[in-house]
Each structure stands twice: as C-alpha cells, then as structure tokens.
Amino acid sequence: MNAGTLANWMQMDRLARERDTDGELIESEREELARLRRQKAEWARERAELEMERDVLKRSVVLWVKEATGR
C-alpha cells in the first residue's frame, strides 16, 4: 500500500469524524462558506463597477471618434 493512499484515507476519516452525525457542516466549514459567500458578493460588486466603467469608456471613445471625424 502506498503511503500517500493511507494518508488520504486517514484524512478522509478525520474529516468524516469532524462532521456531525446528521451531516451538518462543522464550525470551520460554516465559517469558510460564509467567507466565500462574502468574497463572491464583493467580487460581484467589483465586476459590476468595472463593467460600468468599461461602458462609459466605450461611449467616450465613440463620441471622440464622431467629433474627430466631424460626423
């Protein structure tokens, strides 16, 4: 048996024992899930802001080109 395989089995068993008997998340997993959800929301806000800035720049370029070409 490979030592890595045994280590993986032991880690899986350790994680299974940390879980509640009814399959609920342990405290550290709940904290990590909450952190990831906050990060996702923050990234969504940042993405929306960047998209808005991109759209403003696109419109500015269009207006600049129209002005430069006299259209």
Image (cartoon, helix red, strand yellow):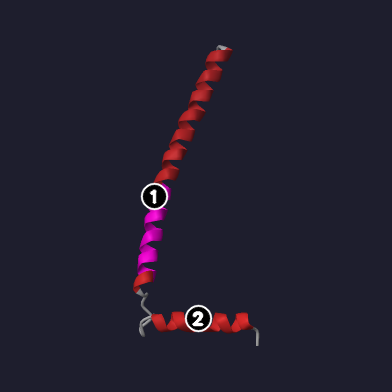
Q: Residue furthest top?
A: 70
Is residue 41 inside the magenta stretch? yes
Residue 52 sits in quarter? top left
Work out how far the residue at label 2 is from the one at label 1, CA to CA, in angstroms.
32 Å
Q: Amino acid at mark 1?
A: Glu
The location of residue 17, given as percent across then percent down, is 41, 84
Q: How many numbered marks, from 0 up?
A: 2
Secondary structure of the residue carrying numbered label 1: helix
**Quick one: label 1, few (<14), some, or many (20+) residues within 10 Å?**
few
Residue 29 in view of the camera: yes
Disc nearer the start of the sequence (2/1): 2
The structure residue drawn at horizontal position 52% and vertical position 19%, both measured from the top left corner, is 64
The location of residue 9, given as percent across then percent down, is 54, 83
The structure residue drawn at horizontal position 39% and vertical position 50%, both measured from the top left corner, is 42
Figure check: 55 above or below 65: below
Is residue 32 inside the magenta stretch? yes
Magenta part mainly helix, strand or loop? helix
Figure check: 70 above or below 43: above
Residue 36 sits in quarter? bottom left
Figure check: 53 above or below 36: above
Q: Nearer the viewer, residue 57 or 19?
A: 19
Judged by depth in the image, the label closer to the viewer, 2 or 1, is: 2
Magenta extent: 29-44
Task: Name the disc covering residue 42, or none.
Answer: 1
The structure residue drawn at horizontal position 36% and vertical position 85%, both measured from the top left corner, is 21
Residue matched to label 2: 12
The location of residue 60, given as percent across then percent down, is 49, 24
